[in-house]
Image (cartoon, rainbow, N blue to C red):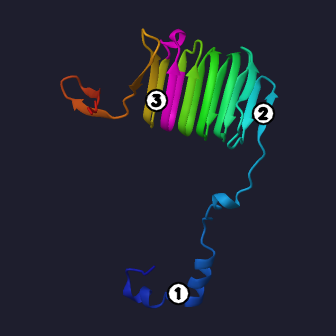
Amino acid sequence: MTHKNPSLRAGSTVSDQDATVRGKSAPGKKPKPESMRVKKPPKKELDGNKWLVENYEKHSEPIEIEVSMSQSVLISKCNHTTIILKGKANAVTIENTQRLSLVVDSLVSTVDVVKSSNFALQVLGQLPTIMLDQLDGAQVYLSKESISTRIFSSKSSSINVNVLSADEDYVEIPLPYQICSQYDPEKGEMVNEIVEHAG
């Protein structure tokens, strides 16, 4: 760094050796490549009232769990795997998954999915709320009992909801993910509207 005053600038030189030492000790480590990371073993266990399902990779058979209303389920880092929850659980949280398929009978509160891609959910009974955050691709299948489920999505794209029609066939409905916002000076507020894509 040089000083604006020419007389100070002349006396403040940095040697090449000092610059080399500083360059080698620069902060910031690079993350390890995926191939060098230690893979943790798969885990399915009940810890108190919470089921922990973690680290399943391309599991050939569906993972079935008997749940009750007092239990919640945390699913993390499960890829190319199908999980079936039998019974009525309290809530399900899913994070950091790819190509996870989840089948639930019923839930007391929510399915909350974060940072996942190509996610699939089938609801056989009732489910009040689905929360989707940072998803890239999702298919949600709602039963007749869960037709009034509220779905909240943020920072997500390519989400389709499938509902049963009168002739018992699923009808696919895409959720909007593009919003147009414009300030309305008469109302004194932002007006938001969904952008429809035809085609």
**Number of residues whose C-alpha sits closer than 10 Å to that of mark 2, classed few (under 14), some (14–19) or many (20 or more):** some
Residue interval drawn in magenta: 130-149
Q: Nearer the viewer, residue 78 or 19?
A: 78
Q: Name the residue that disc number 1 marks.
A: 14
* Contact? badges 1 and 2 (CB < 8 Å): no
Where is 130 relative to 79, above or below? above
Sooner in the amino-acid sequence: mark 1 or mark 2 = 1
Under tag 2, what secondary structure?
strand
Place of residue 185 in the rendered image (x, y in percent of width and height, measured from the top left): 19, 28
| SS at mark 1 in the image | loop
Residue drawn where x is 51% and y is 10% of the image: 144
- Which residue type carries mark 3? Ser
Closer to the observer: label 3 or label 1? 3
Q: Give the image quarter of residue 19.
A: bottom right
The residue lying at 43 percent from left, 10 percent from top is 167
What kind of residue is marked 2? Lys
Give how far across and how far down residue 12 sits, in percent.
49, 87
User: In the image, is 91 to the left or to the right of 7?
Assistant: right
Under mark 1, the amino acid is Val
Q: Is residue 21 left or right of residue 138?
A: right
Q: Is residue 132 magenta?
A: yes
Q: Earlier in the sequence, mark 3 or mark 1?
A: 1
Tag of residue 44: 2
Q: Residues within 10 Å of mark 1 (few under 14, many from 20)?
A: few
Q: In the figure, is residue 99 to the left or right of 173?
A: right
Residue highlighted by disc 3: 153
Question: Label 3 vs label 1: CA separation?
Answer: 54 Å
Question: Which of pointers 3 and 2 indicates the residue nearer the eye?
Answer: 2
